[in-house]
Amino acid sequence: MRSLLSCGVRTVRHTLQKKMHSTVSCSTVEKKYQVRKLEISDKSKGFLELLQQLTVCDSVSDQEFQNRFEELKACGDDRVVGVIEDECSKKIIATGSVFIERKFIRSCGKAGHIEDVVVDSNARGLQLGKKIVEFLTDHARSVGCYKVVLYCGARNTGFYEKCGFEQQAINMGKYFV
């Protein structure tokens, strides 16, 4: 069993949620969650299972994961996936990504596009989604983007408005699969 010091501090709410959904318990004091960039080892920490809570995420072999990870890494700051790992369970409990579009308009400006934001159903209400969106937005700003956009369903607009976004346009899409 991990010591209370190594697990940090947890909110009472999170502890209650954990007890309701799992037998794993770490501590009853507040924990600080940190956003970091995706690491190759995150596949074994439930990263793909977390994405399944958002959308279709079929089986991905270790080799396929490594190949895609290396592709994204080669793009440098133009492709960033942020994650939050629960230090007690060693599971990825929140994620989102941003890609940087290089444009001709606005003096060859850049625009950030946020995608695939999801928080584990057992960790919702802890402001982790907001932390992920702030991390991605800050990244876009730091690389010189003049804007950052995202598309979401109507049921999520309230969340993104709390993160400082406003409705701008109608989203259109055409799926090939």
Image: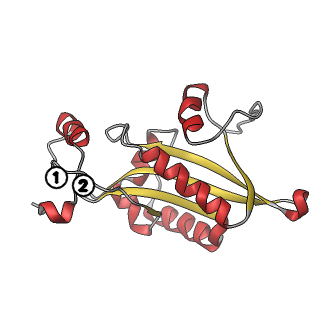
Is residue 151 depicted above or below 63 in this figure? above
Q: Are marks 1 and 2 in contact (CB under 8 Å)?
A: yes
Q: Quadrant of residue 167?
A: top right
For the C terminus, the quadrant is top right
Is residue 1 depicted above or below 48 in this figure? below
In this orientation, does residue 58 appear?
Answer: no
Q: Where is residue 111 in the image (x, y as percent from the top left)?
A: 75, 55
- Which is nearer the eye, 165 or 118? 165
Q: Is mark 2 on a helix, strand or loop?
A: loop
Residue wearing tag 2: 89
Along the polypeptide, which appears first: circle 1 or circle 2?
Answer: 1
Residue wearing tag 1: 26
Q: In which quarter of the image is residue 16?
A: top left
For the N terminus, the quadrant is bottom left
The Cα–Cα distance between marks 1 and 2, rounded to whole angstroms, is: 8 Å
In this orientation, does residue 159 appear?
Answer: yes
Please name the amino acid that badge 2 sits on.
Ser
Q: Is mark 1 on a helix, strand or loop?
A: loop
Residue at point 45%, 42% (across, down): 52
